[in-house]
Structure formats: structure tokens, C-alpha cells
């Protein structure tokens, strides 16, 4: 019995020490940041979209697109080889939870920087400025958001475009799915009248071979969507490092190369990354 009591006491002490150690980790030490993790492990888990042609598209175990190339640039700048990247598919609604729960280290997934999201996560970037637009049938008479009254419009649950339709165009009938590919399929089946999200995402879908000639992007953007790189709210050092890497990607040509190898194939010239607009990390 004495041995049992001693073992129990030792266990209690060990547990208390472990809890104290854990408490130390939660105090905001830099060990939880992406810079330290990348340096120590040479590995990163990066959340990306899997169903956005030209941006983030999964085929088997391979991911391709502009966001994927940007993520590779960031990983390299952090000292992580491409082989050390674990891609994790995200959808619009789970990006903040994945970051907060530590399921991913970074999110590069057409992720609009806005004040609501900045309350819970930090953002590097923006690395691209998009604009909300509409994808419609090639013969549609919809000419812009002012034409949406009474129309069935599809977007993704938890996305900025869906919220904008709800608040700014309440007479539209909003249908929400967990991915834009489902919206595009519904448009092809003529069960909805329009898909709304960022113009560059819509252009990627319209350019897919199976939809050639069937759709058109209206071409009347009605928002400004700065795409950022999401990471933990407390990781200021990681945010600053990401911005440094983005600046370097402009001067070394890797940013333009990322565009040219993906979205540039559509014929759209590479945008100019305005490094003066990068976020003030906090």
C-alpha cells in the first residue's frame, strides 16, 4: 500500500509539472509561432482550397494553382522544402477554426482579409486583390448585381461574397453550399441563375474544358477582396516574416513566375504586387 501511495504521489507531482509546462507554452512564447516551427521541424501544414481551378485544385494527392505556388514560396522562405509541406484541404467556413485549433500552420486559400476575421486570426499579405463578380450562363441577361432581384444566386457558406449578397442585395434568393464547385454544377444544371465569388475564381471555372462556351463572367466587380495568408492571431513574428518573403518574391521574380505558371495561362497578365499595401502585423 505504501508503494502504491508513493507511486500515486509521484504521479501527481509529474502531472503538476506537466501542467505547469503546458501553461508556460500558452503564455505566448515564440515556440508556438510558424517561424520557429519551420526552423525546427522543416515541416508545415498549409490549408488550401481543393476545388478552385487555377488557384487551388486537387487531383489525386497533387495540388496545383496560384495559391499553391504562393504557399511554396512562403514555405521556401521559411526554410521548408516542398517535400516538407503537408497540404490540408479547407473550405471557407473552417479556415479560422483550423488556424485556431492548430490543424494548420498557414492558410493560403483565396482568404479575404477583413476586420471580422482579424479579430481571431492574423494575416500576412495581401498577395492579390480580387473583386466579387458573377458567373452566369452565356446567354444570361444578368448584367450586374443590380439584376439579381428575384434571382437564385449561389455562393459558399461562411464566405465574404455570400454575406455581401445577404446584406447588400437582400432581394436575391441566396443558395449556399460548402464549395464553389457545387455552385458551378448547379449553374450548369440551370437550377440557379448565377454564382458569385471573386472574379479570378469565376474565371478559372469558366475556363474549364467541360464548361467552355457555356458560362461568362459578367465583368462588373462590386467589391475589393484582398487575399491574405492566415495564421495564428498571436503570431506577429510569423506575419512579419511572411510579408518579408512576399516582398522578396517580387524582386527575385518568383511571384510573377507563380502567376505565369497558373492563372497566367488564361492570358491575363501578372498583377503588380504593391508591397506598400502589406498588412501591419499585430
Image (cartoon, rainbow, N blue to C red):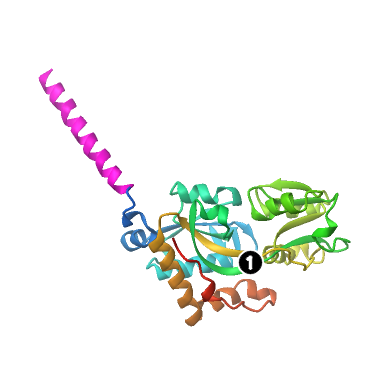
Q: Is residue 245 above or below residue 189?
A: below
How crowded pointer 1 is (Cα within 10 Å; few <14, some 14-19, many 20+) is rated as: many
Q: Is residue 77 above or below residue 116?
A: below
Examine the image and state in which quarter residue 223 appears.
bottom right
Percent x, y of residue 32: 35, 54
Q: Is residue 70 above or below residue 43?
A: below
Percent x, y of residue 258: 55, 74
Quarter the N terminus occupies:
top left
Taken as a whole, is the magenta stretch helix, strand or loop? helix
Q: As rendered, which of 274 and 49 lies closer to the eye?
A: 274
Q: As rendered, which of 26 and 40 lies closer to the eye?
A: 26
Left-right relation of 66 to 235: right
Q: Report the number of discs.
A: 1
Left-right relation of 208 to 114: right
Disc 1 element: loop
Q: Residue at x 55, y 67 (%)?
A: 126
Q: Looking at this rendering, what residue extends furthest in the top direction?
A: 1
Q: Residue at x 27, y 38 (%)?
A: 19
Examine the image and state in which quarter residue 127 appears.
bottom right
Q: Residue at x 84, y 64 (%)?
A: 143
Asked if the stretch drawn in magenta spans residue 64, the answer is no
Asked if the stretch drawn in magenta spans residue 19, the answer is yes
Which residues are the magenta region? Answer: 1-26
Q: As rendered, which of 116 and 271 lies closer to the eye?
A: 116
Identify the residue position indicated by label 1 in the image: 54
Percent x, y of residue 152: 81, 49
Percent x, y of residue 66: 58, 68
Amino acid at each position: 500500500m505504501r508503494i502504491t501511495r508513493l507511486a500515486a504521489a509521484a504521479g501527481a507531482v509529474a502531472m503538476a509539472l506537466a501542467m505547469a509546462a503546458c501553461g508556460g507554452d500558452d503564455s505566448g512564447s515564440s515556440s508556438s509561432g510558424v517561424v520557429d516551427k519551420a526552423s525546427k521541424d522543416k515541416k508545415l501544414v498549409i490549408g488550401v482550397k481543393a476545388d478552385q481551378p487555377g488557384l487551388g485544385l486537387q487531383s489525386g494527392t497533387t495540388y496545383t494553382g496560384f495559391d499553391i505556388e504562393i504557399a511554396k514560396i512562403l514555405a521556401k522562405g521559411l526554410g521548408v522544402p516542398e517535400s516538407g509541406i503537408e497540404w490540408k484541404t479547407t473550405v471557407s467556413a473552417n479556415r479560422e477554426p483550423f488556424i485556431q485549433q492548430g490543424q494548420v500552420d498557414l492558410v493560403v486559400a483565396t482568404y479575404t482579409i477583413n476586420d471580422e476575421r482579424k479579430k481571431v486570426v492574423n494575416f500576412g499579405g495581401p498577395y492579390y486583390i480580387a473583386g466579387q463578380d458573377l458567373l452566369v450562363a452565356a446567354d444570361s441577361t444578368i448584367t450586374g448585381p443590380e439584376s439579381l432581384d428575384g434571382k437564385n444566386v449561389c455562393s459558399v457558406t461562411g464566405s465574404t461574397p455570400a454575406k455581401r449578397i445577404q446584406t447588400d442585395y437582400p432581394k436575391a434568393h441566396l443558395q449556399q453550399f460548402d464549395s464553389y464547385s457545387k455552385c458551378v454544377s448547379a449553374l450548369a444544371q440551370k437550377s440557379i441563375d448565377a454564382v458569385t465569388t471573386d472574379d479570378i475564381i469565376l474565371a478559372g471555372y469558366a475556363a474549364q474544358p467541360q464548361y467552355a462556351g457555356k458560362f461568362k463572367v459578367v465583368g462588373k466587380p462590386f467589391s475589393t477582396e484582398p487575399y491574405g495568408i492566415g495564421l495564428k492571431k498571436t503570431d506577429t513574428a510569423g506575419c512579419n516574416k511572411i510579408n518579408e518573403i512576399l516582398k522578396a518574391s517580387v524582386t527575385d521574380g518568383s511571384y510573377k513566375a507563380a502567376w505565369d505558371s497558373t492563372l497566367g495561362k488564361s492570358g491575363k497578365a501578372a498583377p503588380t504586387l504593391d508591397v506598400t499595401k502589406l498588412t501591419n502585423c499585430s
